[in-house]
Image: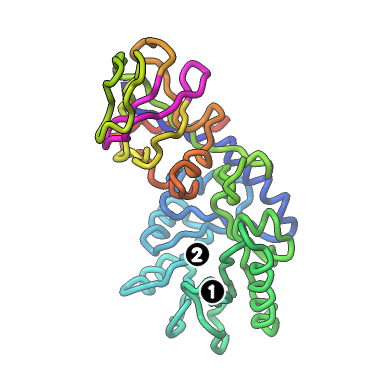
Amino acid sequence: MHRSEITIDLGALRRNTRRLRQVLGEAELWAVVKADGYGHGAIDVARAVLDEGAGALCVATVAEALELREEFPEARILVMGPPAGRDVALAREARIELTVSDGEVPDDVPVHLKLDTGMGRWGLRELPEVSGQVIGLMTHLATADSDPDFAREQLRRFEQATRPHAQLTRHAANSAAALRLPESRLDAARCGIALYGLSPFGGNPAEDGLEPVLRWKSHLAQVKQLGPGESTGYGRRFTAREPTFIGIVPVGYADGFRRDMTGTEVVLDGERRLVVGTVSMDALAVELPERLPVGTLVTLIGDGVLAEEHAAVADTINYEIVSQIDSRPCRAQRTVVDA
């Protein structure tokens, strides 16, 4: 038995893709599949979204783009991070589009100029002369999920700066903006988190018609009873006040179940149960209502348990929860379904 099993539901991914394309109307959907598809598997994700009409694939590095190019020789691929070293030559050979956010515009490779309108990260302060290899203009919204007024101000700045170049593809929207700010959709929207059925707003993804794509399950590897005053885990953060059954699950922070997710809930036998004590590198403890059999299924994400809930307990975002799950065969079994 594997320590845990990760299931990627491409059917849900396809439905999320169709949902976003419906929202975007005439704007193209460009699928963000960086960081191995936010931990969902970039190749599987890319194949499904391209089948559903995504116009391009977006990644962070040329290395990520080259892996995709091997599988998808005709797909449009955009690298959103800054190129370095031999990246430009490799991109040119592989017909990959690059983003320029500083410095000179390289020759003989399709380029998108990135304007910093308020993100304060990658981006040009103002547009340089737009040469022939420039095919797109872009910006990135800092607060589309939390402060729509500032996002609209960024859009105003972007539209003002790019108005003389309306013949080029202009793109600014991320998932949050695509869903809630119609004026941001422009010619294309770069959507990532929503494709995977995760809420860019930290709430329930169903509110925006999205379905979680990833499920993560494990099992009880040991069950024991603690007496009053006995504890489990490092630091004795959980001490039983009365006779208490606990189950040990063979998943820990090395697998992506973060140490600061102590206090979150998982599902056993259809019921939510509390994660107690300190999450270890390779194990976590769950408080049980009674002695349950070793091998009892434990749902870490799925069956109503959302990545957003774990993120709230850990004071982080759902992006970080899913992208840190270790799906290597030595740690977990990964299954892909398309239902």
Residue 145, placed above or below residue 263: below
- Give the quadrant of the C terminus: top right
Q: Amino acid at mark 2?
A: Leu
Mark 1 closeness class: few <14, some 14–19, many ≥20 residues within 10 Å: many
Q: Helix, strand or loop at disc 1? A: strand
Q: Position of residue 156 (x, y in %)?
A: 69, 76
C-beta proximity under 8 Å, tags 1 and 2: yes
Q: Quadrant of residue 94?
A: bottom left
* Residue 41 seen from this side: no
The residue lying toward the viewer, choosing from 152 and 230, is: 230
Tell whether 13 sits left or right of 215: right
Q: What's the CA distance linking mark 1 and mark 2? A: 9 Å
- Which residue corresponds to the image point at 61% horizontal and 58% vertical from the top-left? 146
Q: Nearer the viewer, residue 122 or 263?
A: 263
Establish if 246 lies above or below 15: above
Residue 103 higher or lower than 121, as above or below: below
The quarter in which the N terminus is drawn is top left
Q: Position of residue 297 (x, y in %)?
A: 42, 19
Residue at 74% across / 56% down in the picture? 25
Return the residue at label 2. Answer: 78
Q: Quadrant of residue 183?
A: bottom right
Q: Earlier in the sequence, mark 1 or mark 2?
A: 2
Residue 199: give x, y in percent of width and height.
59, 46
Mark 2, other Cα within 10 Å: few <14 / some 14–19 / many ≥20: many
Task: Report if residue 286 lies within the magenta region.
Answer: yes
Residue type at numbered disc 1: His
Q: From which residue to which does the magenta span run?
A: 267-287
* Disc on res. 112: 1
In the picture, measured across the screen, residue 65 lies left or right of residue 156, that is: left
Assign a secondary structure to mark 2: strand
